[in-house]
Amino acid sequence: MQPRVSEQLLIDAIGDSGDRRALCFSLGRGQLAAHLVDQGAKEVQLLFSDIYLAEQAAGNLTPSSGVQVKCEADFPEGPFQLAALPCSRRGDGELTRELMQQCYHRLEPGGEFWVSVDAPKDTWIRNELGKLNRSVSRHIFEKGVVYRLVRGHSSVRLRNFGCEFKFRDQDRLIDLKTTPGVFSHRRLDTGARCLIETMEVVAGDRILDLGCGSGGVGIAAALRAPETHVTMVDVNPRALACAEWGLKKNEVRRFETCLNAYVEVEASGSYDLVLANPPYYSDQQIAKIMFEGGFKALRPAGMMLLVTKQPEWYHEQYGDKVAEYQSWSWRSYTIIAVRQFDD
C-alpha cells in the first residue's frame, strides 16, 4: 500500500531525524514512522485512532524496527524532540486542531514539529499553527504543503475540545461526553435516538452495543432494567474513552469495553440484545462485519436491532438467513430487527 499523500509529503520533506525520540500519527500504514527510523530516530511512537489500521501497520513493521505502534485516545506523554503530523483536507477540523495542540505540547523546547496537508493552497492549517508559534516555515509541493515550526520556551495554553451534555431517555437524564474524532461529537445522533426509542430491555439482559461511539445507546439500554450487563465495542479508542466516562458517570455497574475491528467478543453466542448503528461507507463492508458479528454474538432466540437509511441492502443480504426479520420506518430511518435461531 502506498503512503497517503500527506504522509508522502512528510517522507519527502524530513531528512536526518538525528538520534531523537519522535512522535507521529498515521492515516495509512505507518510508512512515515518507518522513514523516521531509517533517517536515524532512536525511537518512534506511532499513534492510530483506528485499531484496524493499527493492526495492519503493526503487521507490516518488524518488532526490531524501533517503531512502537499505539492505538490510544491521546498521544503518549513526552518529552519528544521531533513530531510529525500528516493531515487530510477532508479530515475533521476539530480533531486536527486537537492533535496539533497535543503534538506541540509534547515536544521539549527546541523540538521540531512537522505538519503536512494534501492541499497546495492551504491557509487553515497555517493559521492554526500560527496560534502555537508565529514562526512557521512553509514548503509548497505539487500535491500539498509541509509546515515546520520549533517549540518555544513559553508555556502552551491548552484548549479543551471535549463536550459534556445530557439527553433524556424516558424519565431519566443521561450524561454523555464526546471528543473530536468520535462519531456525532457534541450531540446525540438521530439514528442513535431511534434505537433508544424502539429498543426493549428486560431485567438481566446481556447487551452488546456495536460501534458504540460515545456510548449513548448502550448506556440507555443498561439503565432501562436492573441487573443488565453491557459490552461496548468500537474501533476508535477515543470513542471507548468517552463511553467509559459515560458508564461511570451514570453509575452503570456491570459493563466492559472492547477495542476491536472484527466484532470478536468474549462469550459470543450469549447476548440477549445487540444494538448497532452501522456506517454507510466502505461499500457496506463495515456494515457486513457488524451485522454478521452481531448476529453470531446472539444467544438462541436473541434479538439484534439496527438502524439504517439503506434497508434494501440488509433485506437482500440477510432477509432469508435469520429466524425472524422485521423492518419499519422510524423518523427518517428504518429500524431492522432480526432474531437468532433457537437451538
Image (cartoon, helix red, strand yellow):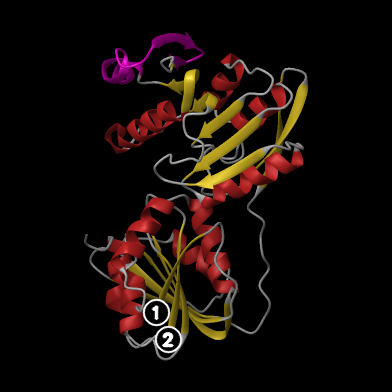
Q: Is residue 139 among what the camera can see?
A: no
Q: Percent x, y for residue 274?
A: 51, 26
Instruction: Please tell me whether residue 84 is drawn above or below residue 2 in the rendered image.
Output: below
Amino acid at pointer 2? Lys
Instruction: Please tell me whether residue 280 is drawn above or below residue 122 in the rendered image.
Output: above
Q: Which residues are magenta?
A: 311-338
Q: Is residue 125 left or right of residue 58?
A: right
Point out which mark residue 42 bears.
2
Q: Percent x, y for residue 312?
A: 30, 16
Which residue is pictured at 49% across the width and 57% down the height? Answer: 96
Which residue is pictured at 29% across the width and 70% down the height? Answer: 9
Work out which quarter of the rendered image holds the C terminus and state it.
top left
Q: Residue furthest front?
A: 343
Q: Earlier in the sequence, mark 1 or mark 2?
A: 2
Q: Percent x, y for residue 13?
A: 31, 78
- SS class, disc 1: loop
In this view, the residue in front, 324 or 133, is 324
Amino acid at pointer 1? Gly
